[in-house]
Amino acid sequence: MAKIQAETDLERARNEVKTTRARLASAKVLEQNPILAKIRMLEALPPGSTIEVREGDPKE
């Protein structure tokens, strides 16, 4: 019984590592491609959402 639990815990930990690595890779891609990051953010909005687009440098 303990062996089965240990194997289950190990598999869960491995999956967490895989998920973390995938998220890190995604974050790096989005950091290197700001336009892609904006597109992904827009895609995440619920249907029917309204956005406001402003001209100019966002740092101002």
Image (tube, rainbow, N blue to C red):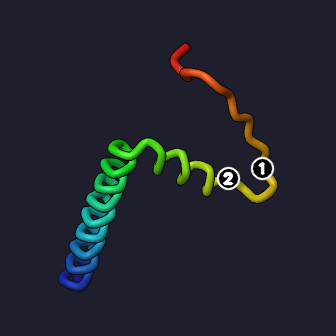
Q: Which of the image's four quarters has the C terminus?
A: top right
Q: Are marks 2 and 1 in contact (CB under 8 Å)?
A: yes
**Amino acid tagged 1:** Ser
**Residue that appears at 21% across and 80% down:** 7
| Residue matched to label 1 | 49
Q: Which quadrant of the view contains residue 46? A: bottom right
Which residue corresponds to the image point at 53% horizontal and 45% vertical from the top-left? Answer: 38
Q: Position of residue 33 (x, y in %)?
A: 38, 46
Q: Where does label 2 land, which residue?
A: 45
Q: Looking at the image, is 13 positioned above or below residue 20?
A: below
Judge by depth and name the residue closer to the eye, 31 or 1: 31
Seen as rendered, the residue at the extreme front is: 55
Residue 10 % position (x, y)? 21, 73
Q: Is residue 40 left or right of residue 9?
A: right
Check disc 2 and report its element: helix, strand or loop: loop
Q: Nearer the viewer, residue 1 or 54?
A: 54
Instruction: Between residue 56 and residue 50, name the one nearer to us.
Output: 56
Q: Position of residue 57 (x, y in %)?
A: 54, 21
Q: Quadrant of residue 8?
A: bottom left
